Amino acid sequence: MSLIDRYIADGKAILLFYQEAECDTFFKNDRYLKRAVRPLYNQLLHRRKKTGFRVSFDLLKEALQQQQRWLVRVNDYATARRYPDYPVGLVGYPVLLERWKLPNPAVLGSALYDHPLQAPRLLEDRRFRRYLVPSQWPYDMFHPYYGDACAQWFAGIDTAQWPDTSNKPKSVDFLIYDKIRWHHSHYERALLQPICELLQRRGFRIEVIRYNHHDHAAYRALLERSRAMLFLCEHESQGLAYQEAMASNVPVLAWDPGVWVDPLADRLGVPGNAASSVPYFSADCGERFVDWPGFEPALERFIDRLPRLRPRDYVRENLSMKRSAEIYAGHYFSLLPVAQPRVNAA
């Protein structure tokens, strides 16, 4: 009996499947050319090398592997095909579901869809038993459609990979993380520039980075030199970047408008859903503000409490790799058949 067969028999294997979304842009099959040149392109522009979906998937795999109780296999179609009653985890983009032909009971997500109306009949497929979302506000969005099959799971933050930087020399007072997704030119004028000007008038040293225009090494180096982060994003289903800052014990002052403003909302006819840019957060992590008029009062509160803020403690208690693995494994292994898994002939 092979290693994977032994773990399947013991109910301790986890079969994960992930696929990036790819499409042709300029001519037929140019997605293959883009796949080949993208690493060089990203390196030249100093962009992050992975999508957020991919980072989340890698964190899931790492969290599960760290526990050393389970054997994790990725995209092992042969094993899933041989054990059609054994559960699988499908993570990433909807293209994976479009091509999914195997009968195995499945945990879907996290990721996949931005709103349940993109696939309102998804869970009518009896193979799909769980649908995972990264935080409370997506759960509130999906649960009315997907019912009790919907559950929360978060990607764990590895505090060993993101160590405490609070005792490092600081040359930046506010690291401003610009992840404004929509109407960027408007918010650059109406929010980002006024914030920068106000901070500089008050003598604060600032550094501005824009999402997708940096790599992790540069980000780590900036966090090490920064006393605090100013996080500008309309909303996040989880928000790994600001959580990595918190793990580094860098307190966060966050723009949190409170509404899901993705253009998809208007296309689906569901404007006004509640959302958050910092869905995992507490008073120990920092402060929030809704708009430009609310910025300076929030800044005052933030500066006053800054020496006492310890966001790393929040991450260790609420976003640990161990807890992330346990939550996912709980949903995954709940789909195990009561009897011995049925085996298909090779």
Image (cartoon, rainbow, N blue to C red):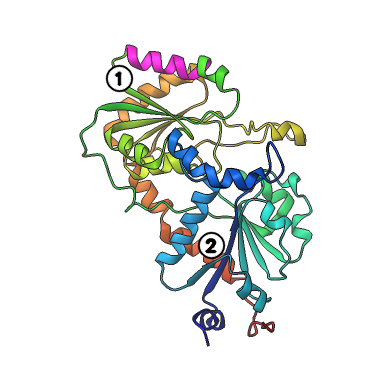
Residue 328 in picture, x, y percent from top left = 53, 62
- Asked whether 69 falls inside the magenta stretch, the response is no
Residue 212 visible in image: yes
What residue appears at the point 74 percent right and 50 percent down from the top-left corner? 145
- Outermost residue, top side: 201
Residue 251 location, quadrant:
top left
- Decide if residue 153 is on the left or right side of residue 124: left
Residue 95 in picture, x, y percent from top left = 68, 52
Residue 207 location, quadrant:
top left
Task: Say how many tags the image has.
Answer: 2
Residue type at the position of mark 1? Phe
Check disc 2 and report the residue beneath it: 328
Check disc 1 and report the residue beneath it: 204
Choose the circle earlier in sequence order: 2 or 1. Answer: 1
Label of residue 301 in the image: none
Residue 65 in picture, x, y percent from top left = 44, 66
Residue type at the position of mark 2? Tyr
What residue appears at the point 72 percent right and 66 percent down from the top-left corner? 127
- Outermost residue, bottom side: 1
Of helix, strand and loop, which mostly describes the magenta segment?
A: helix
- Asked whether 194 falls inside the magenta stretch, the response is yes
Magenta residue span: 190-201
Residue 77 vertical position relative to residue 215 in the rendered view, above or below: below
Between the C-alphas of marks 2 and 1, the distance is 42 Å
Q: Quadrant of the C terminus?
A: bottom right
